[in-house]
Amino acid sequence: MTPSTLNYYLTNSVEDQELAMLFYFPLYGTDGETYDDYPILASSMVVSKDKKDYTYNLNPNARWSDGTPVTTDDFEFSFNKLMDPKVEAAPLRGYFEGVKFQKIDRLKFSFHIDQPRFNTLQVLNGFVPLQKKQFENEPDFNKSRENLRPIGTGPFKVTVFSRDQQVVLEHIPDWWAKDLPRFKSRYNQNTWTFKIISDMALGYEKFLKGEIDLVSFTSEQFANQVTKSDREKVGASREEGKSVWGGKLPTDAAMAWSGLALNLNSPIFSSKNTRKGLAYLVDYKAVIERAYFGLISQSVSPFGSNTENTDPGLKAGKGIYTYDPKKAAEYFEKDGWVKKDGLASYVKDIGGKQVTFSFVLKYYASNPASEKMAVILKEVFKKSGVNIDLRPTDGAALSKDFDDKQFDAMIMGWGGGSIYPDPKQLWSSDSISDGSNKVAYSNPQVDALIKKADLEFNRKKRAKLLQEINRILYDDVPYIFMIERHFVIEGINSRFKSPKWIERYSPTVAKELFYE
């Protein structure tokens, strides 16, 4: 899908953000192997004893891709722009609530926060500036043409942006950070070309022909082609000597998860009993086997089902939802759904009107696995008297419908997060109007736990709070947590070498380490 923007502040998908981070760099980065921070735009940083003031000294050598110096003017402008409510950056802005910026001199500034939170340092270290000169005279930041012509601080600059075709990045030979210890053996490629191919089958064929060097396999491709019909063409490792290879690369990262987002503003989904009934109608095994060919696991948490932040009981499979039509019927009946004589579907009186248990399910049209999942859900739900109207939707429209809360239910995936997750964006009632809580979930107990976790600096104690949040979310069912994977399935051209294909806490391959 063509990126809607290359402006880091305005990105609304994992893919767009990953692309933007090749030319927008933060104050500090996070090591994918150790999870320690390392300096990039900052040369040093000092935290006050009360953890309320964070003073940064910028690297005097830092440069924008047009050669001009990076200064605190850029940071001041960027911070003010990010905190402007007219800027469509609500998810990112939420992390900086309560933060104040103070410019000290050309290369020194500080962030002040009245109430330090568990991830304050991580958030502030990750602050990404935009160039003031590029945007200061733009009348509409959100719709500026400059959003597709980024001037960044990273190793690449955009040379081609061809809608629905490709984005080409060229390496900056005299990139200011190339001699920093962290980057001496990274970003060695001269050109990165991102092909925009919505047809996954076509992308796979281009990979086999050597026209694409790196591709993420679908479960079906890996199960039926890579390891079976095309086994003579695709090696299981680079050492096999074939022109391309592909495999499962394990990671300890909190990986992406996918589920059924239920709009709690809908009269049908406003009751927890109905939502729990639906959770017991999902044939998880059928989804895993038929849509993902056994290369996926049932998700029980938005925090990474295998991490310390997930409830131990759920992690062990205790009390999880399984396909159980009888239990589903019990919950539906508790909520007033009945099957009247001669009717195959549940009905219920809502607002004085008899309503049939039916809803529209939207999903990404170009994702074969999502389509198979939707078909499976339609099949098994119909057997129990729940009707689904399937609506395949293109990516841009699906994202807009989600943001505008224009959906009954939606197959929705969320990218892998930090191993120290912040639940506020998705689950706090404060994030309904200005955040990513588009399902309108609200639970005072969860709100209180989120605020408590915000102020807990002890990792183990905080993990216990997140486990409790996980238990409540799983029981409340604002989403039906369905699937997640604990490894990356990737295909790589054998002409590339790399000291490491994936880092311990990374949800993607270590592309910056590849070299020919």
Image (tube, rainbow, N blue to C red):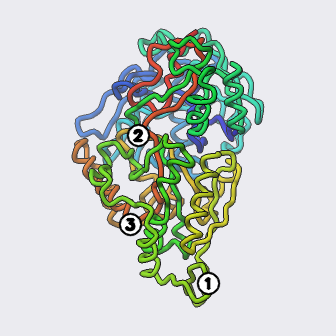
Where, quadrant-wise, is the N terminus in this rendering?
top right
Looking at the image, is mark 1 or mark 2 earlier in the sequence? Answer: 2
Q: Position of residue 462 (x, y in %)?
A: 26, 47
Looking at the image, is mark 2 or mark 3 earlier in the sequence? Answer: 2
Q: Can residue 262 be seen in the rendering of this structure?
A: yes
The dot on residue 343 is 1
Mark 2 residue element? loop
Q: Taking 470 as reference, is 163 left or right?
A: right
**3D distance between C-alphas at marks 3 and 1:** 35 Å
Count the marks: how many? 3
Q: Bin the neighbour count of mark 1 within 10 Å (Cα to Cα): few under 14, some 14-19, many 20 and up.
A: few
Q: Can residue 454 be seen in the rendering of this structure?
A: no
| Mark 3 lies on residue | 443
Q: Quadrant of residue 401?
A: bottom right
Q: Bin the neighbour count of mark 2 within 10 Å (Cα to Cα): few under 14, some 14-19, many 20 and up.
A: many
Mark 1 residue element? loop
